[in-house]
């Protein structure tokens, strides 16, 4: 595919991943093969122009100057590549806003990755991640890497300011399935943050550190199933979930029902209202997905059975672009 006509895809992600508030995130790939994320198309043009399309384009501000993707373009041309030729930048907004699936991160990551490739600036991984985190902070209110890093790099990432390179990839069993359900209504990220405690006491701080460190250590157990089960048993969010759950209609009912249907762990994806459940076989994943379809989501919602997207952000092949067009036609 010509680099003068790029299509770059960035996948949805689960922030917090239950045990890792603001520090652990996972990129998602539906097992059906369909794309769950945003696409940015960059084409050489006579003058700079921006257009927003896709299923959720009408949920974004109508003015280009208020769109994160366009702001990324302006920044890139002013500070990164002032002599870059004019482009037509198209954001295909395929993730709902305020969903808890890293929607703003998707737009930012796809845009900067596409511009870097188009302009051949060859920014380093660290430079791109820092740039992406700066712009995602415009929406989230802080430089949180737990959506940015997995969205860009793929897989499950331990992230943060103190982490070397801002990210360390964590191995996850291949047989884990993630049932992800967006109920069909949005939850403002600022509102979801406003209900959180301003600080944790010593007991809860130590418990959080133990839970996260033990979870990661158990996952590095070279395939010992018993330790994987212990890791799943640790997947509880005692930091954010107790405060955010009351904001999400139907969450408490799902929290009670899904473990009885085979879910080994369950929590809120990012700031919500999307929830995710972890299953260790496809039969249980299908059972949980069926319950969520009937009991958790409305006509505007969706449910996907996913595994980790190990590739992260990437240029789409021709058949993937055609498939995207077929789905959104």
Image (tube, rainbow, N blue to C red):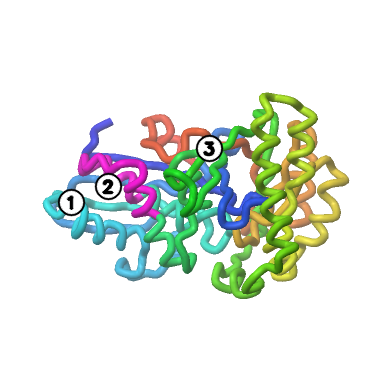
Query: Is residue 299 visible from the viewing direction of this image?
Result: no
Mark 3 or mark 2: whose residue is earlier in sequence = 2
In the foreground, 149 or 11: 149
Comparing labels 2 and 1, the label whose residue is closer to the camera:
1
Comparing labels 3 and 2, the label whose residue is closer to the camera:
3
| Residue labelled with disc 3 | 169
Q: Position of residue 286 (x, y in %)?
A: 75, 38
Comparing labels 3 and 1, the label whose residue is closer to the camera:
3
* 251 sits left or right of 127 in the view: right
Q: Residues within 10 Å of mark 2 (few under 14, many from 20)?
A: many
In the foreground, 304 or 298: 304
Magenta stretch secondary structure, dominant = helix
Residue at the image position 77 percent from the left and 52 percent from the top = 294
Q: Position of residue 84 (x, y in %)?
A: 15, 50
Tell me: residue 308, above or below residue 260.
above
Question: CB of mark 3 within 8 Å of CB of mark 1?
Answer: no
Q: Residues within 10 Å of mark 1 (few under 14, many from 20)?
A: some
* 231 sits left or right of 17 in the view: right
Q: Which residues are magenta?
A: 111-132
In the foreground, 248 or 243: 243
* 204 sits left or right of 7 in the view: right
Mark 2 or mark 1: whose residue is earlier in sequence = 1
4 in the magenta segment: no
What is the number of the mark on residue 115? 2
| Residue labelled with disc 1 | 81
| Marks 2/1: CA–CA distance | 9 Å
Question: CB of mark 2 within 8 Å of CB of mark 1?
Answer: yes
Q: Position of residue 327 (x, y in %)?
A: 50, 42
Residue at the image position 73 percent from the left and 60 percent from the top = 238
Query: Is residue 292 visible from the viewing direction of this image?
Result: yes
């Amino acid at each position: 595919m010509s680099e003068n006509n790029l299509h770059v895809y960035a996948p949805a992600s689960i922030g917090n991943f239950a045990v890792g508030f603001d520090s652990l995130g996972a990129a998602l790939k539906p097992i059906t093969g369909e794309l769950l994320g945003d696409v940015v198309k960059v084409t050489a043009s006579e003058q700079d122009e921006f257009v927003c399309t896709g299923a959720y384009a009408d949920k974004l501000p109508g003015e280009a100057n208020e769109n994160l993707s366009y702001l990324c373009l302006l920044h890139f041309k002013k500070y990164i590549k002032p002599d870059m030729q004019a482009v037509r930048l198209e954001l295909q907004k395929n993730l709902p806003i305020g969903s808890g699936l890293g929607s703003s991160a998707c737009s930012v990551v796809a845009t900067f990755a596409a511009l870097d490739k188009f302009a051949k600036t060859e920014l380093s991984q660290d430079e791109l991640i820092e740039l992406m985190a700066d712009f995602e902070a415009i929406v989230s209110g802080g430089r949180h890497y737990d959506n940015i890093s997995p969205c860009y790099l793929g897989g499950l990432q331990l992230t943060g300011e103190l982490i070397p390179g801002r990210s360390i990839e964590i191995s996850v069993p291949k047989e884990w399935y993630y049932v992800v359900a967006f109920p069909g209504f949005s939850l403002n990220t600022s509102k979801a943050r406003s209900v959180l405690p301003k600080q944790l006491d010593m007991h809860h701080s130590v418990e959080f550190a133990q839970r996260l460190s033990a979870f990661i250590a158990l996952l590095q157990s070279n395939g010992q199933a018993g330790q994987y089960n212990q890791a799943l048993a640790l997947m509880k969010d005692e930091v954010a979930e107790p405060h955010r759950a009351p904001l999400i209609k139907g969450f408490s009912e799902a929290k009670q029902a899904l473990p009885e249907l085979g879910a080994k762990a369950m929590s809120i994806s990012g700031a919500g209202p999307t929830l995710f459940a972890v299953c260790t076989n496809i039969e249980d994943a299908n059972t949980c997905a069926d319950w969520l379809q009937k009991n958790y989501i409305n006509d505007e919602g969706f449910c996907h059975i996913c595994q980790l997207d190990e590739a992260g952000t990437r240029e789409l092949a021709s058949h993937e672009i055609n498939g995207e067009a077929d789905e959104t036609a």
